[in-house]
Amino acid sequence: MYLYAATIFFSAFLLFLVQPLIAKQILPWFGGSSAVWTTCLVFFQSVLLAGYAYTDWTTRRLAPKKQAWLHIGLLVASLAVLPIIADVAWKPSGDEDPALRILGLLLVTIGLPYLLLSTTGPLVQAWFARTFSNAVPYRLFALSNLASMLALLSYPVAIEPWVNTYVQSWGWSAGYFLFVVLCSTAAVYGLRSSTVPVDVAPSRAMPAAEAARDVSAQPPTWSALTMWLSLSAMGSVLLLSLTSHMTQNIASVPFLWIVPLSLYLLTFILCFDSQGWYRRTPLMLVGAGLLCVMAWGLHSNEITLNIKIAIPLYCAGLFVLCMFCHGELTLLKPAPRYLTTFYLMISLGGALGGLFVGVLAPHAFNGYWELGIGFVLVALLALIRVRKAPVYALVVAVGVLVFTAVQSGIYVKEKLADSLTIQRNFYGVVRVKDYGDPKTDPEAVRSLVHGVILHGEQRLDPARKMDPTSYYGPASGIGLAIDNSQEGPRHVGVIGLGTGTLATYGRPGDRYRMYEINPQVVDIAWYWFSFLQDSKAKVDVVLGDARLQLEREAPQGFDVLAIDAFSSDSIPAHLITKQAMEVYLRHMKPDGVIAFHVTNRFLDLPPVVRRIADEMGLKSVIVSDEPSDRKDRFLSSSDWVLVSRSDAMLQKAAIKAVAQPVDSKPQWRLWTDDFNNLFQILK
């Protein structure tokens, strides 16, 4: 029994440890977008489904001996792909579908090992049930989810801060080799200890005790299969859609996905534990209240704009609603004979939920509408589950369903009503909004918003439309760097297009080269804003990840290079490493300035930049601008770290008067392409 438990625990730990590990490897190649994680989850859930299907088929169709030796053969074959290090040939060129490329990369890099790890839980439980004929294997499912949660929580705290990604990959690969040995041993032990003939398929021969149990165990009906599928799919939809909603519309906090995923796994642990933590009536009443508040909160600023209310509310709601979904699954679980089919349907539901949120929704919707849809569907599921309950329960269930549908509709209507355009793709949802009527209001302004992050705005008064706004005012670090660069024609690079505000500093003869990974942002900047076309400078826009494009280009000879990509939840850490700085320096003039926009409510980025600058013998200062002290309400507070090879630019009077030394954190480890620690720099 301990051998089976250890095999399941170790496999589940590796299964969830590889998820953040491989995602972090490829994150820099795809712009640091949070959608990388969502796409990875779609892959993980889909391969998990394939693993459960393999387990179900081999358990029902193959004799135990054939199944065991087939599995051992696949385990040995999977060692050929180690170590799990992504091939640089998969780096995108800028015009391909990121999601498809990520899925292909993951399939080649970790496909077979992940498939075999995903089979371990249900497969070893089947071996366990065959070896111990009177044992109930479902508690092992709770054990596997406990191991998964421990792996997930340990990565950002105990692994990522101390070990670089290269060593992580080799360490995981060594652990996988040990798993292959452990799982093969369990397979051989199962053959020697089985109460079933090892060379006869289960459908043709089994011991009398098991045969008697199988006669009394009714096979699952189509309605049961559908309910297994629906409940597991809803848990997956709620997990992914609530995580996206919290990170994109409430708070741009890295690691916010860890808490929802941990709560999701915890509900599996509690519901499938033998003590039976699920109590339908009280939990459904609490869930009904939370569901109504969350649905109302979709369009309520009292909740959305208050992080201290919104985050606990949506996390608590996710926990309770997933307890409902997974608790109802435990009430419907079949006899051990059908456990592989049960797990197969759970996995299929999880994969379908992931595909809906991670693949279908970004292409089918122009906003984050899937959360509201999820609220309505879970309310409908609850109504179906209590359809035979007393009348008062039905009244409550119908009321919750109607309320959530109405509130979700209001949310969509409001988002569409105040947007000139709203667009969505792999990189998220961007909206263009007008504040004030330009015909009557001289202070009317047009804004580009991504979630809760302002990515630029333009005044609509024709006389003021080329005034720099938001984080890019004349007194900001970037404004001072551009204005105080050479007298002749300037060459300015910008990583992160936004609305193209920095083009307002362009003069005749200047050249501006702007890099943007999101094609929708490029289209919006040209169509809805006029900074680019009205600039006096020659403006070029390069589509694709800036780091990859700069690596491929000939030296540009920039006077100023603005790195403006660190204000949202998707922190492209590959743009703030020692190797990235080396790339930037190759494109700079000897006295050029690299300006890092480090305005961020949640991350302390300036010491990271200084640590890199000090390591490379560069000079650095920080310029913090507080325009709230002035009357211009179109300017925002900003922090810019200016880095240069020499003091010449940084000692100019206008910059020297406002610049301050950057805080030094010598205890912080140098960020490289193999190492970064976002957890450490959380404010």
Image (cartoon, rainbow, N blue to C red):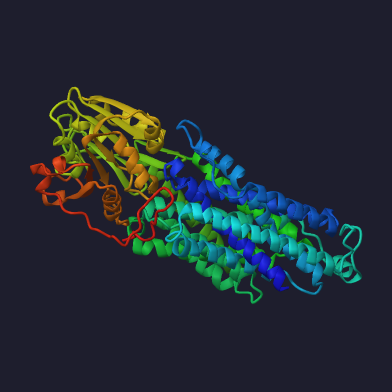
Residue 516 vertical placement versus 507 (above, below) = below
Residue 551, quarter of picture? top left
In the image, is 672 to the left or to the right of 375? left
Which residue is pictured at 44% across the width and 50% down the height?
674
Could you tell me residue 615's position as x and y percent?
29, 51
Hey, which residue is sitting farthest bottom in the picture? 275
Decide if residue 549 is in sight here. Answer: yes
Residue in the image at 60% along x and 72% along y: 278
- Identify the image quadrant of the N terminus: bottom right
Please state, as top left, top right, bottom left or bottom right, where the C terminus lies in the image: bottom left
What residue is at 59 percent from the left and 71 percent from the top?
270
Is residue 316 or residue 676 the one in the foreground?
Answer: 676
Q: Nearer the viewer, residue 327 or 418?
A: 327
Image coords of residue 635 (percent x, y):
18, 44
State the count of labels. 0
Q: Quadrant of residue 232?
A: bottom right
Residue 664 horizontal side relative to residue 220, left or right: left
Residue 251: percent from left, percent from top = 36, 55
Q: Which is more toward the observer, 183 or 283?
A: 183
- 95 lies above or below 394: above
* Residue 235 appearing in the image: no
In the image, residue 541 lies at what x, y percent? 33, 29
Frontmost residue, 69 versus 381: 69
